[in-house]
Image (cartoon, rainbow, N blue to C red):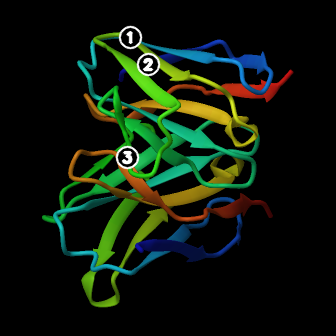
C-alpha cells in the first residue's frame, strides 16, 4: 500500500496570502495524484487531477505540481472560502490511498 | 447535473450488517464508462477509500475490509450499494459514494451519510 504523507498538518494564514501544501508518497506514483478540498459538513470536492490539471470549475488560483514522490498544491491568494482541509490521493496502485490531510485555517 | 445520494440505516448494532445504497440521478450508471466507489470518514478523522466497482463488475476492496465488504450495482434502479458485515464500533463513520471518472479520479460525490455502530 502506498502511504501519502501530507505536511504541514495545519497551515495558519491570512486572506490574500499564498498557501503551499505538500504531499509525499512512499513510492513513485508518477503523476497519478489528485487533490481534494473538504469543508466542514461537506463532501470532498475534486480540485486537481494528474498532479497538475484543474478539475472543471476550479479557480485558477489553485495549482498543482510535482511527479514521482513529491507533490505540491498551491493556492496563490487565499480567499475566505478556501479555508478548509485538503487531501491528496493516489491512483497509481490498489488500494487507492489518501493523505491524512492539511487544514488551512485563518490566522 | 449528476447527483449521488446515499441512503440506508444510520444505526447498526455490533456484529450486524451495514447496508447502504447510492442512488444516481442526472445520468445513467451504465453510460460513459464510469466506475463507482465508496469512501468513509470516521468522526474527526481523514478519508479512507473502501472499494470500487467498474462497468464490467470488477471490484477491488481495501485489504483490511476485503473479507467483510461487497460493492454491487443495480442497473435497473440506477444505483450501487455497499454491504459491510460483522461491524464494530470502528466502522462508525460518514460513508460517501462517488463516481470514478475515466481518469480514475472521484469527480462527483454524494453528501455522505453517518452510520453509527452501537448497541
**Residue bearing mark 2:** A3
**Residue bearing mark 3:** B66
Q: Chain of mark 1?
A: A
Does the image show residue B86?
no
Q: Quadrant of residue B7?
A: bottom right
Q: Quadrant of residue A51?
A: top left
Q: Which residue lies at the image location 36% right of the left edge and 23% below the top edge?
A: A1
The reply to whether discs 1 and 2 touch (Cβ–Cβ < 8 Å) is: yes
Residue density around tag 2, few if under 14, some if 14–19, many if 20 or more, within 10 Å: some
**Residue bearing mark 1:** A26
Q: Which residue lies at the image location 62% right of the left edge and 60% below the top edge?
A: B15
Does the image show residue A73?
yes
In this view of the protein, which residue sits in the foreground, A74 or B114? A74
In this view of the protein, which residue sits in the foreground, A5 or B102? B102
Q: Which residue lies at the image location 38% right of the left edge and 18% below the top edge?
A: A65
**Residue A59 image position (x, y, % from top left):** 50, 41
- State the SS at label 3: loop
Give the spatial CA distance, label 3 vs label 2.
19 Å
- Which residue extends farthest bottom? B76
Amino acid at each position: 500500500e502506498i502511504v501519502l504523507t501530507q505536511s504541514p498538518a495545519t497551515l495558519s494564514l491570512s486572506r490574500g496570502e499564498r498557501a503551499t501544501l505538500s504531499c509525499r508518497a512512499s513510492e513513485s506514483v508518477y503523476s497519478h495524484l489528485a487533490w481534494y478540498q473538504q469543508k466542514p459538513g461537506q463532501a470532498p470536492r475534486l480540485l486537481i487531477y494528474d498532479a497538475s490539471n484543474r478539475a472543471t470549475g476550479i479557480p485558477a488560483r489553485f495549482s498543482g505540481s510535482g511527479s514521482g514522490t513529491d507533490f505540491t498544491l498551491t493556492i496563490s491568494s487565499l480567499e475566505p472560502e478556501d479555508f478548509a482541509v485538503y487531501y491528496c490521493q493516489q491512483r497509481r496502485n490498489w488500494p487507492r490511498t489518501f493523505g491524512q490531510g492539511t487544514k488551512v485555517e485563518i490566522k | 447535473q449528476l447527483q449521488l445520494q446515499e441512503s440506508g440505516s444510520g444505526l447498526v448494532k455490533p456484529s450486524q450488517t451495514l447496508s447502504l445504497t447510492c442512488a444516481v440521478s442526472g445520468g445513467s450508471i451504465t453510460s460513459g464508462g464510469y466506475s463507482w466507489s465508496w469512501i468513509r470518514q470516521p468522526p474527526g478523522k481523514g478519508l479512507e477509500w473502501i472499494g470500487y466497482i467498474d462497468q464490467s463488475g470488477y471490484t477491488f476492496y481495501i485489504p483490511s475490509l476485503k473479507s467483510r465488504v461487497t460493492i454491487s450495482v443495480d442497473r435497473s434502479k440506477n444505483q450501487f450499494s455497499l454491504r459491510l458485515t460483522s461491524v464494530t464500533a470502528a466502522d462508525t463513520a460518514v460513508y460517501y459514494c462517488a463516481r470514478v471518472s475515466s481518469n480514475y479520479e472521484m469527480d462527483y460525490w454524494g453528501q455522505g451519510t453517518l452510520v453509527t455502530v452501537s448497541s
